[in-house]
Image: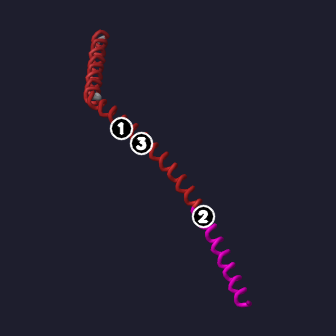
Amino acid sequence: MNRTEFIITTAIILFIAFAMGWFANWLVHRFTRVRQSDVADLDRMSQELHEAEETRDQAITYLQQREAELTNQLNQAEAELRAAMEGLRDARQEAEELRAQIERA
């Protein structure tokens, strides 16, 4: 094999390798190409996710406000109960004192 034949053979081998690489690249891109419908589905899902996150945030805010209201109502009810219990205790003590005065008299 002389020098010219070696160069031609090497050029042919390199061209075949290039062609095979190009064809393999074309096949990979052909099968992994993202379709427009897939992109539309992803856009729709991302919009729905965004709306769901907003709804969740609104629900969390509402629940926090409601919890604060209920805690406030509970504290008020407990204060009223304590006041009523103290009033009842005072009334019982006064009734006992009146009974004691009636018995002495």
Which numbered circle lies on residue 31? none
- Choose the circle earlier in sequence order: 2 or 1: 1
From the image, give the main secondary structure of the stretch colored magenta: helix
Q: Quadrant of the C terminus?
A: bottom right
Callout in the foreground (2, 1):
2
Q: Which residues are magenta?
A: 77-105
**Distance between mark 1 and mark 3 Cα atoms:** 10 Å
Up/down of 3 relative to 41, above or below = above
Q: Nearer the viewer, residue 98 or 33?
A: 98
The residue carrying mark 2 is 80
Q: Which residue is pictured at 50% across the width and 51% down the height?
A: 66
Would you identify the image quadrant in which residue 101 lies? bottom right
Q: Amino acid at mark 2?
A: Glu
Q: Which residue is pictured at 30% across the width and 18% down the height?
A: 14
Residue 85: % across, % down: 62, 71
**Distance between mark 2 and mark 1 Cα atoms:** 47 Å
Q: Nearer the viewer, residue 95 or 81?
A: 95
The residue carrying mark 3 is 55
Q: Quadrant of the N terminus?
A: top left
User: Dots 2 and 1: beta carbons under 8 Å?
Assistant: no
The residue carrying mark 1 is 48
The total of numbered circles placed on residues is 3
Please, what secondary structure does the residue beneath circle 1 have? helix
Residue 57: % across, % down: 46, 43
